[in-house]
Image (tube, rainbow, N blue to C red):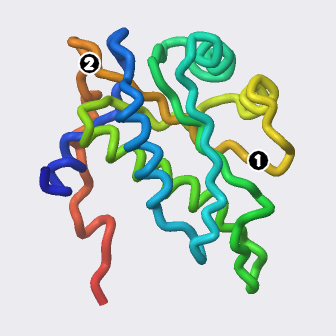
């Protein structure tokens, strides 16, 4: 599929079928995460694949109960493995994890899977339930699965600002 068509067709899927995502597709999602660019290619991303019922139940303690995925990736970064900008000490961790999540989200759409980027999660619950080390910082929970038959984009999905509102050519 053409990239812009893929980007246009991808939407935040909030209703998933019970169909399990095949291991081969999970491997492709992880490969998309591995190939994502990171600052100085330090690759600080750390990903927990949440797919067992036990792990999904742990995750549900920290995310909206309205979401019922069959698969989720907790995308984090190792704060000790990030590039740091010398001018102000800014860490690349959140940006790197966000780029990784975007690659995974687009690959999920390419594979016929639905996904939703969940930033509204309780990081303390995720850290505790998944026993994250202090240096591992969760950024996003990417819930995924096969879209339910009645899954559809939100009403705001196709609303876009005019290109001149979001860009400036000098």
Q: Could you tell me residue 58's position as x and y percent?
A: 68, 16
Q: Nearer the N terminus, badge 1 or badge 2?
A: 1
Image vertical order of residue 100 relative to residue 153, above or below: below
How many residues crowd mark 1 within 10 Å: few (<14), some (14–19), many (20+)?
many
Q: Which residue is mark 1?
A: 136
137 or 24: nearer the viewer? 24
Tag in front: 1 or 2? 1
Residue 90 in picture, x, y percent from top left: 72, 71
Outermost residue, front side: 24
Position of 4 compared to 16: left or right?
left
Distance between the alpha carbons at the discs numbered 1 and 2: 33 Å
Viewer-nearest residue: 12 or 126: 126
According to the picture, the residue beneath numbered tag 2 turns out to be 151
Q: Residue 108: where, in percent of width, then height? A: 33, 39
Quarter of the picture containing the C terminus is bottom left
Query: Going by the image, does 128 lie left or right of 163?
Result: right
Task: Name the residue: 74% across, 85% down.
Answer: 87
Find residue 74 and report its horizontal and vertical position in percent.
60, 36
Eyeballing the image, is 141 above or below 36?
Answer: above
Assign a secondary structure to mark 2.
Answer: loop
Residue at 28% of width from left, 39% of height from top? Answer: 109
Task: Report the disc number at residue 37.
Answer: none
How many neighbours does mark 2 have within 10 angstroms: few (below 14), some (14-19), or many (20 or more)?
A: some
Q: Residue at x 70, y 29 (%)?
A: 122
Compared with residue 20, is residue 108 higher up or lower down, i.e. above or below?
A: below
Residue closest to the far bottom? 170
Asked if the residue at tag 2 contacts the one at tag 1, i.e. Cβ–Cβ closer than 8 Å, the answer is no
Q: How many marks?
A: 2
**Residue 102 seen:** no
Determine the residue positioned at 75% across, 84% down. 86
Q: Secondary structure at mark 1?
A: strand
């Amino acid at each position: 599929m053409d990239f812009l068509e893929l980007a246009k067709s991808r939407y935040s899927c909030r209703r998933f079928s019970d169909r399990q995502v095949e291991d081969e597709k999970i491997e492709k999602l992880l490969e998309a995460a591995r190939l994502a660019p990171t600052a100085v290619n330090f690759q600080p991303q750390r990903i927990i694949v949440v797919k067992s019922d036990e792990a999904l139940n742990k995750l549900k303690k920290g995310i909206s109960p309205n979401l019922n995925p069959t698969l989720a990736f907790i995308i984090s970064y190792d704060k000790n493995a990030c590039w740091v900008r010398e001018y102000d000490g800014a860490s690349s961790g959140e940006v790197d994890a966000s780029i990784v999540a975007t690659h995974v989200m687009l690959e999920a759409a390419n594979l016929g899977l639905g996904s939703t980027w969940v930033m509204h999660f309780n990081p303390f619950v995720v850290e505790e339930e998944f026993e994250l080390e202090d240096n591992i910082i969760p950024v996003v929970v990417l819930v995924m699965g096969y879209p339910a038959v009645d899954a559809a984009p939100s009403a705001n999905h196709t609303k876009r600002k005019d290109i001149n509102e979001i860009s400036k050519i000098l």
